[in-house]
Image: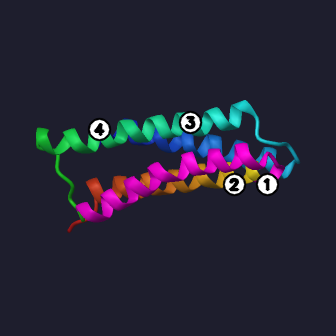
Amino acid sequence: MIDVFTIVLVAVATLVGLLSVVLGLTGRKPSDVTLLGLVVVEVLLIAQVVIAIVAPLTGNTATGNVGEFWLYLVTACIIPPVAVAWALAERTRWSTVVLGVAALAVAVMTYRMWQIWNVQLA
């Protein structure tokens, strides 16, 4: 995995998460900004899947458990679409908070994936 890409993904997910949580707690319903922010996170996760497939072919293999890495990655890819779908169906201030929590969960999972790929020994 590319370190800079991981930093960007964690930063975007954290920013979207904090923005959504604050907006939700102040009583705002999901807006286009919060929804599109999570869509950007999902697009970055799809790019992460491509990187994870290509990296071993170039000799950059995971130092940790590959199964755990893929479990985190697949789960992280499932969370944003479900959160966006729920927010679109619900349209309450709490669905904005859920968008934020989903984005923060993806940020934590991305950092954990980076640890598995680069730091953790199998």
Q: Split into 4 quadrants, where in the image is the C terminus? A: bottom left
- Mark 3 — residue? 39
Residues packed near mark 2 inside 10 Å, few (<14), some (14 to 19) or many (20 plus): many
Q: Name the N-terminal-most of marks 3 and 2.
A: 3
Residues packed near mark 1 inside 10 Å, few (<14), some (14 to 19) or many (20 plus): many
Q: Name the N-terminal-most of marks 4 and 1.
A: 4
Q: Residue 3: x and y, percent?
A: 34, 41
Question: In screen coordinates, is 61 left or right of 29?
Answer: left
Q: Name the N-terminal-most of marks 2 and 4.
A: 4
Residue shown at 82%/42% (left/top)? 29
Which amino acid does the dot numbered 1 rest on?
Answer: Trp
Tags 3 and 4 in contact by the CB under 8 Å rule?
no
Q: Quadrant of residue 71?
A: bottom left
Q: Name the N-terminal-most of marks 1 and 3.
A: 3
Which amino acid does the dot numbered 4 rest on?
Answer: Val
Residue shown at 26%/64% (left/top)? 67
As helix, strand or loop, the secondary structure at mark 3 comes to helix
Tags 1 and 2 in contact by the CB under 8 Å rule?
yes
Q: Residue 16: x and y, percent?
A: 64, 41
Q: Residue 17: x and y, percent?
A: 64, 47
Residue 82 painted magenta: yes
Q: Quadrant of residue 37?
A: top right
Q: Which residues are magenta?
A: 66-94
As helix, strand or loop, the secondary structure at mark 1 comes to helix
Residue 94 is marked as 1
State how far apart marks 2 and 4 are (Cα).
Answer: 27 Å
State how far apart marks 1 and 3 are (Cα).
Answer: 18 Å
As helix, strand or loop, the secondary structure at mark 4 comes to helix
- Mark 2 — residue? 98
State how far apart marks 3 and 4 are (Cα).
Answer: 17 Å
Residue 50 is marked as 4
Secondary structure character of the magenta stretch overall? helix
